[in-house]
Image: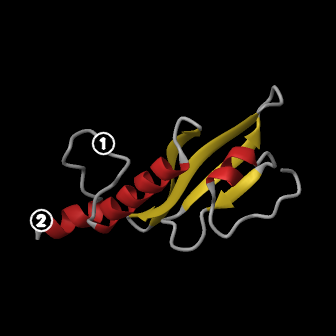
């Protein structure tokens, strides 16, 4: 799929076939989800999911796992869950307990 056009929204077929290194966004409204395709040192193609979110006013990349271990549907579900956690004032990177750790800003608001 060397000359394929980037889709507006990722598809299962595109994710399976893309081999050109780069970052491919899942489109507008995709909760910051993207597929990172890179060539490894031994010449293989590696694909990983990442999500760009803002936590405590800082832009942060969250790793969601490698493809095909994490499917497109699973990556979308994880991105939505992370976005919801951030919206509720929690930091999705802190998964120590079922009740997630609040962000510094949310913690400060609770202390007032």
Q: Nearer the viewer, residue 70 or 92?
A: 70
Task: Give the alpha-carbon distance from disc 1 to disc 2, as whole Å.
Answer: 22 Å
Work out which residue is located at the far right of the displayed protein and give it. Answer: 3
In contact (CB < 8 Å): disc 1 and disc 2: no
Looking at the image, residue 24 sits to the left or right of residue 68; the answer is right
Q: N-terminal of the two: label 1 or label 2?
A: 1
Q: In the rendering, at what x and y percent does residue 73 appear?
A: 49, 51
Select label 1 or label 2 by which is in front: 1
Count residues near mark 2 (Cα–Cα under 10 Å), then give few for <14, some for 14-19, many for 20+.
few
Residue at the spot 79% in from the left edge and 45% down from the top edge: 19
Residue at the spot 80% in from the left edge and 29% down from the top edge: 41
Q: Nearer the viewer, residue 98 or 17?
A: 17
Residue at the spot 14% in from the left edge and 66% down from the top edge: 110
Count residues near mark 1 (Cα–Cα under 10 Å), then give few for <14, some for 14-19, many for 20+.
few
Q: In the rendering, at what x and y percent does residue 39 appear?
A: 79, 38
Q: Which residue is mark 1?
A: 95
Looking at the image, residue 51 sits to the left or right of residue 43; the answer is left
Q: Which residue is mark 2?
A: 111
Residue at the spot 21% in from the left edge and 40% down from the top edge: 97
Q: In the rendering, at what x and y percent does residue 99 appear?
A: 18, 48
Compared with 94, 90 (above or below) is below
Q: In the rendering, at what x and y percent does residue 108 appear?
A: 20, 65
Q: Which mark is residue 52?
A: none
Looking at the image, residue 9 sits to the left or right of residue 33; the answer is right
Q: Secondary structure at mark 1?
A: loop
Which of the image's four quarters has the C terminus? bottom left
Work out which residue is located at the far bottom of the displayed protein and give it. Answer: 28
């Amino acid at each position: 799929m060397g000359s394929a056009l980037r889709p507006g929204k990722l598809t299962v077929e595109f994710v399976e076939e893309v081999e050109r290194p780069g970052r491919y966004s899942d489109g507008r409204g995709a909760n910051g989800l993207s597929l990172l395709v890179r060539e490894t040192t031994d010449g293989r193609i590696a694909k990983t999911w990442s999500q760009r979110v803002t936590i405590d006013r800082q832009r942060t990349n969250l790793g969601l796992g490698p493809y095909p271990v994490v499917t497109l549907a699973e990556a979308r579900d994880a991105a939505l869950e992370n976005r919801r956690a951030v919206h509720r004032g929690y930091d999705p990177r802190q998964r120590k307990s079922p009740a997630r750790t609040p962000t510094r800003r949310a913690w400060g608001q609770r202390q007032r």
